[in-house]
Amino acid sequence: MRSGIRATARAAALLAAAGLLITAVPASAATPPAAEPPADVIPGARTATPALVDGIREAADAKASPADAARGHLAAKESRYKIAEPGRDLAPVQTLKRGTEETVRLQQKHKGVPVLGGQYVVRMEHKGGERVVTGTSGKYFTGLTTGVTPAVSEATAVRRAVAATQARLGGHRLALTDARRAAEREQPLRGTAGGLVVVPRGEGVLTHHITVRGTHPATGAPVLQHVYVDARAGFPVLQYSGIKTIAPDQDATGTPPKAAADGDPAPHPGTTGSGTLLDGTTVDLGVRKAADDRYVLADHARMAASSKNALTTWDARDKDVYEVLGGWPAGLKEFSSPTARFGQDATDSGAVDAHWAAGQVYDYYKERHGRDGLDGRGSAVNSLVGVTQFGMPYVNAFWDGTKMVYGSGDSDYKPLSADLDVVGHEMTHGVVENSANLVYAGQSGALNEAVADYFGNAIDVTESGIAMDHPDAGLIGEDLCRTSAPRVCALRDLNDGATTSRSFLGATFATDNGGVHLNSTIFSGALWDMRQDLGAETADRIVYKALTEYMTPLDGFTDGRNAVLAAAKDLGVTGQRLATVKRSFNAHGVVPGWEQALGVDSDELFGKLNVTGTSVQAGGGWWTAAKSNDDGTEPYSVYAGRADGKGAPKLISPNDGRYHVNPATDGKTVVWAAYGPASVDVLSRPLAGGPIKKLHSSTSDDVAGLRVENGVTVFETLGFFTRHVVHLRPGDTAPTYVDGNSDEVLTALPSIAHGRIAYAKLYPEGGDYRLGVEILDLKTGKKTLTERLDEPQTLGQTGINGSHVFWLTEQDATDDGQMGIRRANLDGTGAYDISPEHKPGALIASDLTVSETAVTVNATLPDTAYRNETLPKNWQFTTDGSRQERVSCNRGEQLSPAAVSGTQVVWIDGTTGWTNLVTRTRPAGRCA
C-alpha cells in the first residue's frame, strides 16, 4: 500500500444525539445570589454522565491542585455527572495551563482497572485567587459492573493474541516461505502483556491488553497490534494497529537518546547552518558542533528558552523499518556534515527537509498556540530519515509514539519528509497522543487522522503562502512525486467534498483500522471549509482548543462536531460566524444521527452481530453465524437460520461464558469452535436440537476453517509453526490428519462437498518444497494432487463442488498480491485459470466459496489509494469464468462470503457501521 495518509465491528463508541438540559444552582447561600448561567448539557451515549457541559461558571477550590479541584467539582455536582467517587475512580492524566485557563484530563478506573477510552475533561479558570469551572466533556461509563479478577492467565492471553494476529495477517494463505519458518522455528511475532483493561461495552469486558510486535509473516511489513483478550474466556475481542502512518516489530536493541533533566549541563548552544531542500530552496538549519568537530542536525537553540532538549534528525539509511518501530535502533547517529553547510547527501536523503520542517512545525505550535513541543513540556523531537524495508525502498512515514520515521522514497516518490504537510501530519499525531489521545480505530481514529491532516496542511499553506481558495490548497503530500503533477501525486484532498451520506465506508478494524484514512476527509473537509470561511487564525485556534480541551479518546464524528462548536463559543464566536461552523459540518453530513441514513441493496438476515475474528458459513439452505448482544459485552453465541429469511434464528451454542465462533453447517448439523480459559474445543449439535457433543479439544493449537457434511467435520489446527487439516467421522474419538501429522508437511484451507475434502498442501519434493491442491476421497481414501500449471508461491482458500475443485493461486509474489482463480477436474486433470493472476484488474483475493454453478471470492481491487472499490467486496464468477460481477453494490466492507446454492451468497456486511449478516440471491452487476 502506497499511503496510509490516503488511505468490524462498529467504532468503539457510537455517538449520542445532542440534547439540552437546563439547570440553575445558587452561587452562594449567604446572600441573595444571582443565578448561575444555565448549563448546556449534551447527554452521553450509553452512560448517565454528560458528554459535554458548557456555559457554566461554578466555583471550585482555589487552593487545591487543579486535579483535586476538578474532582471536587465532579463530586459536588454528583446529581449532574453521576460519578459517585471521583477521587477513587478518576486518576489525573494531564493538566494543561494556558494563562488563567486550566484543562484537567482524568482517566476512569473501574475497581482500580483502567477503562479503555474512559477519560473526562474539566475546564477551569484560575485568577485573582479564585477558581471557577467553565465546562466539562468526555466519556465516563456509569454502567460498568464487571468483575476484575481474570480467569485467563497472562501467558494464555499473550499466546492467543499472537495467534490471532498471525491468523489475521496470514491465515488466509499458505506460502512457500512458511516451510522455511516452520523448519527454522522462526516466529515473526511476539506479544507483551500490558496489564488489565476494561473495554467499555455495556457492563464492561475485562481484558488483557497485549501488544504484538514483529513483522508480517507474508510481506515482512512492520507490525504493532493492540490486542484486547477477554480475561474470562481468552478470545480476542478487539484488535487494531498502533502504527499511525502517513501512508495506508521487533523490539529494538538500542537505547533512545536520554532526555535532558534538571541539573544536566547545558548543551552546546548551537549555531545556524544551512542546506538545500529537495525542491531546490536553500534554508537555514539549527545545528550543533559535535566533539569530533563535525556538525550535526541537532537544533538546541530553538528549544533553549524552555528546555535542554533538541530537535534532532537521525541518519537511518542503514535501518529497516522493523528495526525502528517501537524502539530505538542500535548504532543510530545524528545526521552530520564536515561543515555547517549540509550538502547533497543530506538533501537527497530527506534529512534537510525533515529537519527544517520539524522546526517549522515546532514554531507553529509554539507561536500560534503556546505549545512547547509535541507533549507541551519541551520534550525532545526526533526524526529518523532514510528508513528502508529489507533494503528496498520504503514509501511511508509514521509516528510510533516516540518519534517520526520517514521512508526513503523510491523512483516515483521523494523521501517522505519532502513535503511540509507530511511532517506536520506526523508531528500532529504526537500532539494528539499527548492531548485528546484519540484511539486509532474507527471514527475516533478517523478524527485522529483528520486533525493531523488539518494542522499538517494548515502549517504547509501558511508557510508557503498559498491562498485558501487555491484549487490545490487542500492537497496533502502533493510535493512528494518526482515527476507527476501535484494533483496526481497528492495523497489526499481536504476539498474532496466527502460526506457521511455519499462517502462514509463501514470497515472492520482489519481494514484500515476501521476506516481511519478512508473516512477522515469527511471530518477534515468540514474543518477545512471552516478555515476558508472563518479565516486561518480563528479556525486554527478553534480546532486546537477543541483537540486539547474538549475531545477525549473515544470521540467520533458527532462528538467532534460538538467539541468544535463548544470551543468556538468558548472563544467568543457567535451569531453568523457560529452558524458558519455549523454549516461546515452540515455540508459534510456530520449531524446527529447521520449513521441511520446509510442504505444497502442486500437483505438483512441477522442484524448487529457485533463480532470480530469469526466467520459465517452456509449449507443445505441454512446459514450459521456468531453474534454478541447489542452492546457487545456478551461472549459470542452461535445461531443458525434459514437462508430464505423465513422463521427466527435458532440459538445453537450454550450460554456458558465461552466464545463460540467460526460455525459451519450443512443444513443438518452445526459445528463450531468454543474458546474457554484453558482450551479451544470443537463442538457439534443437530440443527433440530439435541445434546451438544465435544469433538475435539486443544490447550495449545488454534482451530480454523471448520466445515461439515453428512456428519463429517473438517477443520484446520494451527500452531505457531504447524498447520494441519484434520477430519472426524461420526463416532471418531480422535481426528484423522490428512497429512499424517507430518512435521515436514503443512496442509490448510479445507473445503468439503460430495464426500471429498480439498485442501492446500505444502510438501517436500526433490530437495525443495512445493505447493499444490490435494483432494481426499473419503470413501476410497484416495488422495489426488491436481495438475500443476506453474510453480505457485502462495495458495489461498479451496472450494469444491460435484464436478470441480477451485482455489486461489499466486505465482508471482511481486505483483501486489493479485491472485488467480484456478479450477481442475475432481481427478486432478484439466487445470486452468477461470480468472488469471496477470489479467488486467486481477483481484487481490482472500477468500473463496463455491456452489454448483458459481464461484464467489472476497477480494479488493489493485489500487494505490483506499476508496470504496478497494475495500473487500464479494465478486462472483460463473464456474468457467465467462462472467464476473459484483454480488452487491453496498459501499462498505464485505467479508466472509458463504455460498448457499446457485448464485445466492450470505456474508458479513459493514456498510451501516454495524456488522450485519446479509444476503442476495443474484449478483448486482458491475456497480459502475
Image (spheres, rainbow, N blue to C red):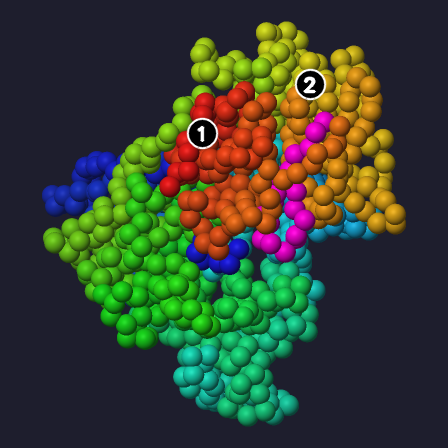
Between 753 and 268, the residue placed more toward the observer is: 753
Q: Position of residue 60 (x, y in %)?
A: 29, 50
Which residue: 30% across, 66% down?
Answer: 473
Can you identify the residue that label 2 sits on? 754
- Identify the image quadrant of residue 232: top right
- Residue for point 11% across, 53% down: 575
Q: How many marks?
A: 2
Q: Position of residue 928 (x, y in %)?
A: 37, 41
Q: Amino acid at mark 1?
A: Pro
Q: Which residues are magenta?
A: 809-826
Give me the residue at 23% from left, 46% from top: 586
Q: Position of residue 419 (x, y in %)?
A: 42, 71
Disc number for residue 923: 1
Determine whether the residue tagged by mark 2 lies in a helix, strand or loop: loop
Q: Is residue 533 left or right of residue 204?
A: left
Q: Which SS class for mark 1? A: loop
